[in-house]
């Protein structure tokens, strides 16, 4: 395997770590059709990519990779599917990178063996074959490491805004798509630049991972009884169960300096945290047990009713704020929608199971589109945001009540 092929093989790692199937699809297209582009036909980088194995650039492979790339892109734009990909993504990306890298290594090794004379020592041939496959395996493992770093580094965003009410996760999806397109183009034109991007990506993900770990550790405080570190908003220690003076919970789950109030357990649940110890709850369901203290998030239907009552207390304030945003033509629409999603819908959506969440989400989208179509009507348009907030709140509340009826059915 020559130096150029080695650079290209290593430089695919951050691309596979971002979008495994999109990257594979674009590399397959470049390997197959890149030589037909006039200004790239004589490029040594394209020549190296054209050494890809025939199965990788065949019609069947290109079509299959294209379908998988579309499915991957669709899943990344779905909140529920993205949550699942976050957990399984590193392993899927490892498998895709390993299969494609070993195929490229096989092709490079075959080309190298054809150039050697029949008098070459057997040990040299065997060493070359081993080195190619070792490098391909190493590049795939590096892809896995980058994917894990990406998952851990972005965990703070998933925890703070799980339903993507702020739209930051959706924006990041487009940024990563552009990154993969640009990375494949660099592989075909400037492999050395792609290798530099690899190093910068690895350094950035590692730094972001360290920052998020330090950020989380700096927030934690020791228990007054057993010294176990816990969240400042925890009413009880998850280890020794000692009661403590908890801090109030602020925006996006951040602890505040002020003391917690009487509705603190419901506010913790709204942030998808255990009402007993403030540990992050990992599942999208009512019937779940805290991994730290072993307490049930909702022990009975009465707990669900108390939670729904706490969420409903936010309704008058939310409608008022939406009315104020609605008074600002056009410019107030987006911040108003974000506000009612954070203040009302987030606490309801977090405990819907995937099937109910998917159905309710699409009903909400159709409802929102239908109401926005009436915005041009003078009187109705002025009240559009409060109507949107109220209608979506009723839709998600009904879905959660139905879930609770099923979970706590006698």
Image (tube, rainbow, N blue to C red):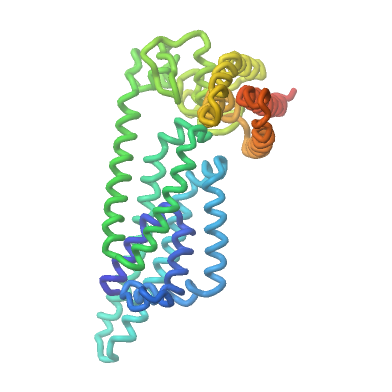
Which residue appears at 62% of the width and 16% of the height?
A: 312
Q: How many marks?
A: 0
Above or below, comparing residue 7 to residue 366 in the picture = below
Quarter of the view holding residue 230 = top left
Locate residue 204 relative to residue 30 in the image: left or right.
left
**Residue 32, position in %: x, y?**
46, 74
Which residue appears at 30% of the width and 50% of the height?
A: 202
Which residue appears at 49% of the width and 48% of the height?
A: 88
List the single residue furthest toward the front. Answer: 378
Locate residue 115 relative to residue 237 in the image: left or right.
left
**Residue 182, position in %: x, y?**
38, 58
List the single residue furthest toward the right. Answer: 410
In what quadrant of the picture does the N terminus appear? bottom left
145 or 337, which lies in front? 337
List the single residue furthest toward the bottom. Answer: 118
Above or below, comparing residue 82 to residue 378 in the picture = below
- Specify whether residue 7 is in view: yes
3 or 127, which lies in front? 3
Locate residue 344 relative to residue 264 in the image: left or right.
right
**Residue 344, position in %: x, y?**
58, 23
Which residue appears at 75% of the width and 23% of the height?
A: 410
**Residue 104, position in %: x, y?**
39, 71
- Specify whether residue 289 is in view: no
Above or below, comparing residue 130 to residue 91 in the picture = below
Quarter of the view holding residue 361 = top right
């Amino acid at each position: 395997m020559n130096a150029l092929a080695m650079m290209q093989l290593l430089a695919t790692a951050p691309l596979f770590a971002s979008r495994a199937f999109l990257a594979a699809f674009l590399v397959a297209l470049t390997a197959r059709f890149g030589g037909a582009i006039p200004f790239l036909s004589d490029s040594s980088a394209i020549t190296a990519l054209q050494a890809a194995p025939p199965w990788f650039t065949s019609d069947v492979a290109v079509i299959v990779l294209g379908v998988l790339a579309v499915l991957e892109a669709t899943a990344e734009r779905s909140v529920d599917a993205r949550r699942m990909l976050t957990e399984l993504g590193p392993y899927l990306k490892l498998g895709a990178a390993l299969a494609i890298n070993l195929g490229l290594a096989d092709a490079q090794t075959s080309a190298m063996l054809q150039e050697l004379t029949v008098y070459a020592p057997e040990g040299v041939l065997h060493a070359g074959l081993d080195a190619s496959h070792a490098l391909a395996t190493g590049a795939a493992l590096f892809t896995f490491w980058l994917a894990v770093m990406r998952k851990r580094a972005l965990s703070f965003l998933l925890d703070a805004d799980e339903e993507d009410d702020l739209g930051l996760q959706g924006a990041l999806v487009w940024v990563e798509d552009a990154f993969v397109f640009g990375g494949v183009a660099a592989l075909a034109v400037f492999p050395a630049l792609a290798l530099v991007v690899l190093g910068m990506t690895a350094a950035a993900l590692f730094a972001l991972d360290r920052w998020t770990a330090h950020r989380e550790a700096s927030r934690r405080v020791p228990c007054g009884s057993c010294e176990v570190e816990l969240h400042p908003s925890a009413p009880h220690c998850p280890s020794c169960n000692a009661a403590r003076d908890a801090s109030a919970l602020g925006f996006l789950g951040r602890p505040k300096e002020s003391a917690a109030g009487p509705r603190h357990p419901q506010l913790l649940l709204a942030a998808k945290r255990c009402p007993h110890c403030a540990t992050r709850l990992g599942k999208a369901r009512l019937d779940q047990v805290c991994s730290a203290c072993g307490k049930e998030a909702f022990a009975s239907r009465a707990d669900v009713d108390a939670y729904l009552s706490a969420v409903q207390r936010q309704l008058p304030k939310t409608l008022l704020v939406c009315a104020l945003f609605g008074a600002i033509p056009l410019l107030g629409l987006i911040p108003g929608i974000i506000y009612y999603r954070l203040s009302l819908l987030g606490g309801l959506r977090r405990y819907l199971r995937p099937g109910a969440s998917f159905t309710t989400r699409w009903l909400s989208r159709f409802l929102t589109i239908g109401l926005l179509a009436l915005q041009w009507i003078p009187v109705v348009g002025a009240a559009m945001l409060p109507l949107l907030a109220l209608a979506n709140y009723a839709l998600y509340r009904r879905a959660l009540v139905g879930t609770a009826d099923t979970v706590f059915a006698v």
